[in-house]
Image (tube, helix red, strand yellow):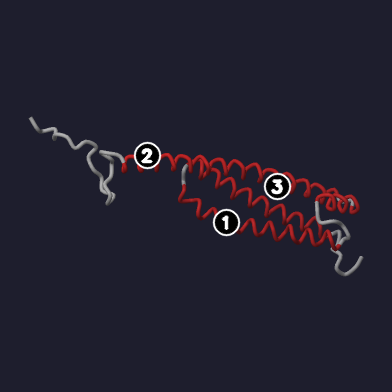
C-alpha cells in the first residue's frame, strides 16, 4: 500500500461520518418541508442557512471519499466504490455505503416534494397579486395610486335619502 492510499480500516469510519452528515441534511430537509406545509415562511431563512452548511459538509465528505477511491486505484463513481468494497470485503463498509445510497435517494425525493410545495406557494402568491393588481387598475379598485384603500363604489352614501 502506498503512503497516499487510504487504509481499509479508515473506510468504515469515514462512511460513518458521511452517513451522519447525510442524516443531518435529511433532518434539515424534513424541517424545511414541514415549514412549507405549515406556511411558516419565517423559518425558511434559518433552515436555508442550515441546509447550505449541511450540503457543504456532505460535499466535503463526498470529495474526500472520491479522492480515496482514486488513491486506491478505482474510478471515482458508484462502480469504483462497489469494486473497492468488493476488494476490501468489509460488510460494515458495504452496509454504510448502501445507507448512503438510500439517503441520497430520500434526499432527492424530498427535494422534489419541497420544490412542488414552493411552486404551490408561489402560484398562490401570484394569484393574490393578480387579484390586487386587477383591483387596483380597474374602476372602483381596492387601492388608489398611493396604495391607500378606497371604497369599492363611489355612489350615494348609505345615509343619503
Q: Give the CA distance from mark 1 to mark 2.
A: 35 Å
Residue 47, how many percent across, how many down? 54, 53
The residue at 61%/59% (across/down) is: 53
Q: Residues within 10 Å of mark 2 (few under 14, many from 20)?
A: few
Q: Would you name the residue on which mark 2 appears? A: 131
Q: Are marks 1 and 2 in contact (CB under 8 Å)?
A: no
The residue at 74%/54% (across/down) is: 16
135 is higher (above) or lower (below) than 93: above
Q: Would you name the residue on which mark 3 appears? A: 104
> Is 78 placed left or right of 86 in the picture?
left
Which corner quadrant holds the C terminus?
Answer: top left
The quarter of the picture where residue 76 lies is bottom right
Q: Would you name the residue on which mark 1 appears? A: 50
Q: Are marks 2 and 3 in contact (CB under 8 Å)?
A: no
Q: Earlier in the sequence, mark 3 or mark 1?
A: 1
Q: Residues within 10 Å of mark 1 (few under 14, many from 20)?
A: some
Secondary structure type for disc 2: helix
Secondary structure type for disc 1: helix
Amino acid at each position: 500500500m502506498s503512503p497516499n492510499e487510504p487504509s481499509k480500516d479508515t473506510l468504515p469510519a469515514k462512511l460513518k461520518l458521511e452517513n451522519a452528515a447525510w442524516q443531518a441534511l435529511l433532518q434539515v430537509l424534513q424541517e424545511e418541508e414541514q415549514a412549507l406545509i405549515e406556511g411558516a415562511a419565517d423559518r425558511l431563512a434559518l433552515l436555508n442557512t442550515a441546509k447550505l452548511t449541511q450540503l457543504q459538509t456532505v460535499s466535503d465528505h463526498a470529495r474526500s471519499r472520491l479522492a480515496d477511491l482514486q488513491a486506491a486505484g478505482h474510478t471515482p463513481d458508484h462502480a469504483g466504490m462497489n469494486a473497492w468494497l468488493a476488494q476490501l470485503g468489509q460488510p460494515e463498509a458495504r452496509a454504510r455505503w448502501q445507507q448512503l445510497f438510500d439517503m441520497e435517494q430520500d434526499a432527492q425525493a424530498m427535494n422534489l416534494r419541497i420544490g412542488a410545495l414552493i411552486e404551490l406557494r408561489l402560484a398562490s402568491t401570484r394569484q393574490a397579486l393578480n387579484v390586487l393588481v386587477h383591483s387596483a387598475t380597474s374602476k372602483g379598485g381596492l387601492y388608489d395610486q398611493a396604495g391607500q384603500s378606497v371604497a369599492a363604489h363611489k355612489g350615494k352614501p348609505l345615509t343619503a335619502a
